[in-house]
Image (cartoon, rainbow, N blue to C red):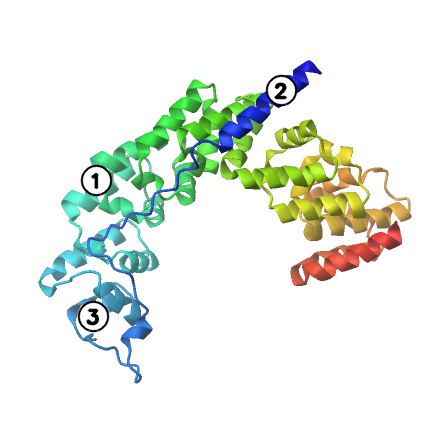
Amino acid sequence: MAIVHFRRVIFNILQKRFFNAIPSSKLPKKPSPLPNKTTEKSCESSKNKSGIHKSVSLHSFPIQYLTKSCGLSLDYAISASKRVTLDECNREHFDAVVSLLKWHQFSDAQIIELVRKHPSILLCRISSTLEPKFEYLAEIGIKGLNLPKLVMLSPAILFRSLDAQLKPAMSLLKRFVSSPEKILVTIQRGSWFLTSDWKGFQHNIDYLIEQGLPHDRLEELIVLQPRCLHQDIERIKYAFEMIKTMGVKPNDLKFIHALRVILSLSELSWKRKVKIFESLGWSSDEVISTFTSSPHCLSCSEEKLRRGMDYFVNTLKIDREVIIAYPKILMYSIPKRVIPRYTVWKMLEEKKLTKTSKFIWVLNKSDKDFMNKYVTKYSSLIPSIVPTYERLKGDWARSPRRLLQSAKFASGIFG
């Protein structure tokens, strides 16, 4: 008891220190690569009542080039022409840029999007700006169709220094992320990474390594949620200590998931979610146990948690101890997964066709296993079981509210 009390005291102290620490640093605003970027106005404002664009020569070189050579629509071409100066005397250079993009397997759609959002790419120098970056990316394994994919995820890299920004940021990422495919996923989830302060990111990674977080766990954290590591170091330190105090070790797979959840929550959100559990009789230790067993439970919205707890406890009459033992069920969709399965299970139970005494075991089956073992297997004995299950799944897609209403009715009949 003394150990439990000491653990609870330490946890409460760390919790207060964590949420009173410097707030999560905001991700840097996506830097504009355009030297003269202005807010893009609606093309409607540039039209008069007759639908003719004002103060824009539709036959001017910029409009003609952007529409015919780059594929932009007229409205987008007009907008882009206001953000970049295209002189006809430089047409050969613009053509060379477009040709370079096509040579590196950029599709027509990608070129249109790139020029539409960043028309100044047509002004970039090929030999000193674009080609060296494409060559570097190819050298480190980002080549073929992966190269345009990466550029489209973070086009600002084309306007940043190769040696001062792109190389060190990418080198840092490659140290911990093992494949080009995973790098693409990381950039997709954190497009700011290659253009923001990589030194702060490295500082946070170094701390986690010093504290014993294994390389494979660190890679998973970076790929799954790079945003976690773009926070103030003090906040990361306190989150790390909080989780260790709960009894989860850094080499445990659940550690990084707990870290992701805590770093994504504000103090108010954390307290509200804890109160939802406590309102149904959870003790502090039981809340901690639930969180460490299935950290993602507390990443669910407050409404989802409240509805899930209410449905399992009050409608299905599942004991609180069962939910504590299997907290993962709180993440399941009530209308999409729980109600259809509960209905099928009760049909089988009425006919004494199931040996499974606990619905929780049925609920945790994969979709394929559930369909094979509880639906199609008994379709000849209970002809209505397949259409009932499919109807409930279909009702979810059409009207979740109606499904909940019918489920309460069904629960009353079976109960």
Q: Earlier in the sequence, mark 1 or mark 2?
A: 2
Q: Is residue 274 above or below residue 233?
A: below
- Residue of label 1: 161
Amino acid type, residue under disc 1 in the picture:
Ser
Quarter of the figure with the N terminus: top right
Is 167 left or right of 145, judged from the image as shown?
A: left
Q: CA distance from mark 3 to mark 2?
A: 71 Å
- Residue of label 3: 64
Residue positioned 55% across, 29% down in the render: 15
The location of residue 337, given as percent across then percent down, is 70, 49
Is 327 left or right of 355, judged from the image as shown?
A: left
Asked if residue 317 shows in the view, the reply is yes
Q: Earlier in the sequence, mark 3 or mark 1?
A: 3
Q: CA distance from mark 3 to mark 1?
A: 32 Å
Residue positioned 69% across, 36% down in the render: 327
Is 269 left or right of 330, judged from the image as shown?
A: left
Q: Secondary structure at mark 3?
A: helix
The location of residue 247, given as percent across then percent down, is 60, 21
Amino acid type, residue under disc 3 in the picture:
Gln
Q: Secondary structure at mark 2?
A: helix
- Residue of label 2: 7
Q: Badge 3, how many Cα within 10 Å: few under 14, some, many 20+?
A: some
Q: Residue lying furthest top in this view?
A: 2
